[in-house]
Amino acid sequence: MGQANHDQVPILMVPFPAQSHLNQLLQFSCLISSYCGISVHFIASAIHNRQTKSRINGLNPQDIAKINFHDLPIPPFVSPPPNPNSSNKFPAQLQPCWDASMNLRKPFSEYLHEISEKCKRVIVVHDIMMASVVEDVASIHNAESYAFNVFSAFYLASFATEAKGKPYPIPQHPKERINIPSFEDCLTDEFSSFEALQYKPRRHRSGNIHNTCRLLEGPYLDILASEDIVKKRKSWAIGPIFPAKLLSSQRQSNKYLAWLDKHGPKSVMYVAFGTTVSLSDEQIKELALGLEQSKVKFIWSLRDADKGDVFDAAEVRRPQLPQGFEERVEGVGMVVRDWAPQPEILAHPSIGGFLMPCGWSSCIESISMGVPIAAWPMLGDQPRTAVLITDILKIGFVVREWAKRKEIVKASRIENVVRILMASEEGDQMRKRAEEFAATVRMANQPGGVSRLELDSFIAHITRPNNIVVSKI
């Protein structure tokens, strides 16, 4: 297929403006652009495009340069005051992301109409949580939309099945009793209302893209592909998408990787809670003491949750550690206060475990690097994804059980799980299993692998001859 043909089929990427969502669609954008030369346009507000480019996680700058970033105008952000003691709910800081999304439909529609007049076909790939923003695709004869699913297939299948009033089957473990957390306290009323807005536009979608691998989540992708859930829409599992390592010259200049270079293979625990939750001061103290008492080496990314505008430094909370903590753990532990290069950290040979909430973006990075997980689910899809990690794939241990989500996790519990994962025969077996999954998904993304074949199929589909029409269900 020639370059000229590709140029007539631009892809408009429309991310939800939260960091893990921005990451995944940017990685997909780079993959598409470098893989087949299709023109890719990353569509967001100016502030979120700036945020995306300032937090390039392991991507080659040369790949970023191929992406066309288009800024859509939206009203200024108004970030609510931080609430550091709201660990079990979607934080108030996410409200501006929802507000920004609600204001994007009109400017996106105007841009879509403009570009559709110049091309034989326009492909819109949107975050699953941005269906309402791209709703006007249905009114343009040469435009098609495809949802990019940023959650695990296990979680999406459970959500879709229960929405139809059916019990959720677990095909991989039909005889084993596995407790699936209810959605109670996982989704706030505000989020549920926002999610409901994305339901109606789904009927106009031409297909679904999953950032996972059939060798990893095949049974759950099959559930999603069943006719009663997705009708006749096409579906592609093209992941896990993981960024390439930075150039060696850039890697050597990073102080965090230089610190990791001083430690032995698989000896360091990476700790990070993402960008959507803020731990309470009391929980930070217990976590610090648990890490210290475990005697395990660690690197801890300790930051407050993002605000709507991450460049607004006003009233940024600096989480407090126990007095003298950093001095006591010097040489054994490192606390990272600014933006951490997570993929590069996980890829470092000294990393042997990852303590995190089980957001899918971090999970697939950890799986791709063969790093087992200490699961501490906090909200949203995380409680169910933690079940996938610990009970189904068996590449992680639970730090905090969801049934005890309203309790502070004590230092003794944290110490115990960290020691098991990092310094026990059981942990070594878990690490070996994680490394086997890493080899599997990496092969899947090589030419001829199952994920690469699905990506080939998606590219062939969107660049097909003009006389083949896709119905918008």
Image (cartoon, rainbow, N blue to C red):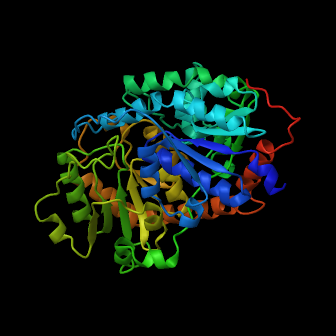
> Where 190 sits versus 384, above or below?
above
Residue 440 percent across, percent down from the top left:
65, 61
Front in this rendered view, residue 293 or 70: 70
The picture places residue 180, in percent across and down from the top left corner, at 48, 34
Question: Residue 252: x and y, percent?
Answer: 43, 79
* Residue 24 image point, x, y percent: 54, 49
Count of numbered labels shown in the rendering: 0
User: At x 66% / y 42%, what residue is drawn?
Assistant: 209
Note whether 226 is above or below 258 in the view shown: above
Residue at the (29%, 36%) spot, across then down = 79
Among the 4 quarters of the image, the one containing residue 324: bottom left
Please tell me which residue lies in front, 86 or 404.
Answer: 86
Viewer can see residue 376: yes
Q: Is residue 242 above or below residue 334?
A: above
Left or right: residue 11 compared with residue 426: right
> In this rendering, does residue 393 appear at all?
no
In the rendered image, which quarter contains the C terminus? top right
Residue 86 sits in quarter: top left
> Which residue occupies the foreground of this view, 124 or 199?
124
